[in-house]
Amino acid sequence: MIHTLRDWLSILVTPDRLIALLTTVFSGWWGYVLLAGIVFAETGLLAGFFLPGDSLLFTVGVVAGAGQLNIVLINVVLIAAAVIGDAVGFHLGRAAGPAIFNRPDSRLFHRDHVRRTEEFYAKHGPKTIVLARFVPIIRTFAPFVAGVAKMDYSRFVTYNIAGGIGWVTLLTGLGYFIGGHPFVRAHFEKVVLGIVFISLIPVISELLKSRKK
């Protein structure tokens, strides 16, 4: 089971394997639906925290640069999936927050993830919805915690849309413009890790500012 999951995730973050998947099993619109579903699951379903959001978006950009996806269309689709996913997470937190907080840990749900996100939200407030987009696990639970905290929905929508646009376009854009470079293809995993680290810089900067205050 775990081996199968790892193999499936490796397909999503390896350009050549993702291209093969999108040109065979999930060709045409099915490919866009698959990718949108993954982004939605990571941001909208609490069990989706293990999905490779940052590296997937970068890989999607590489695949688009290779001519297998329309970069404008895939960005529109994935931004919509990210925004809708956060909206679902928000309403889930508002409607069922206490019950989910009190449920026991399982393989796909850990209360520590929610508590960690709650602390992050308490420090940074509504900005968390934007900052969390670039932090694995936190981005899955941030909209849920915002819903539990009864954040004003009109404010949430503004931050949600801004975060979704920034997250998707930045990472797919990087993949699109530099993914075809021989160095990047030869050291793809290291480059992806570097991209993820760079995407964390705004969050690290915000944390440092908070500590100074």
Image: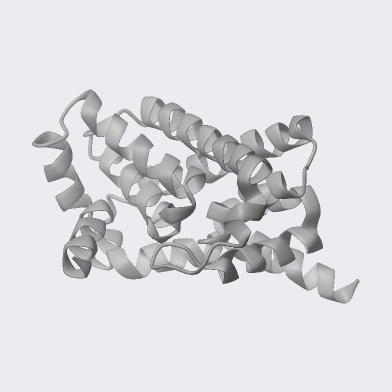
For the question of whether residue 207 can be seen, the reply is: yes
Residue 3 sits above or below residue 17 on the image: below
Residue lying at 19% horizontally and 25% vertically, measured from the top left: 28
Residue 49 sits above or below residue 177 on the image: below
Direction bottom: furthest residue: 211
Residue 50: % across, % down: 40, 61
Residue 171 sits above or below residue 204 on the image: above
Residue 85: % across, % down: 51, 38
Seen from the viewer's position, the closer of residues 39 and 162 is 39
Residue 196: % across, % down: 48, 62
Direction right: furthest residue: 213
Q: Is residue 3 left or right of 134 when viewed as pictured?
A: left
Say which quadrant the C terminus sits in.
Answer: bottom right
Q: Is residue 66 left or right of 56 when viewed as pictured?
A: left
Residue 2: % across, % down: 22, 68
Q: Which quarter of the figure has residue 202?
A: bottom right
Q: Is residue 176 left or right of 2 when viewed as pictured?
A: right
Residue lying at 80% horizontally and 63% vertically, measured from the top left: 123
Seen from the viewer's position, the closer of residues 1 and 96 is 96
Residue lying at 46% horizontally and 61% vertically, measured from the top left: 195
Say which quadrant the N terminus sits in.
Answer: bottom left
Direction left: furthest residue: 24
* Colour approach in the figure: one colour
For the question of whether residue 69 can be seen, the reply is: no
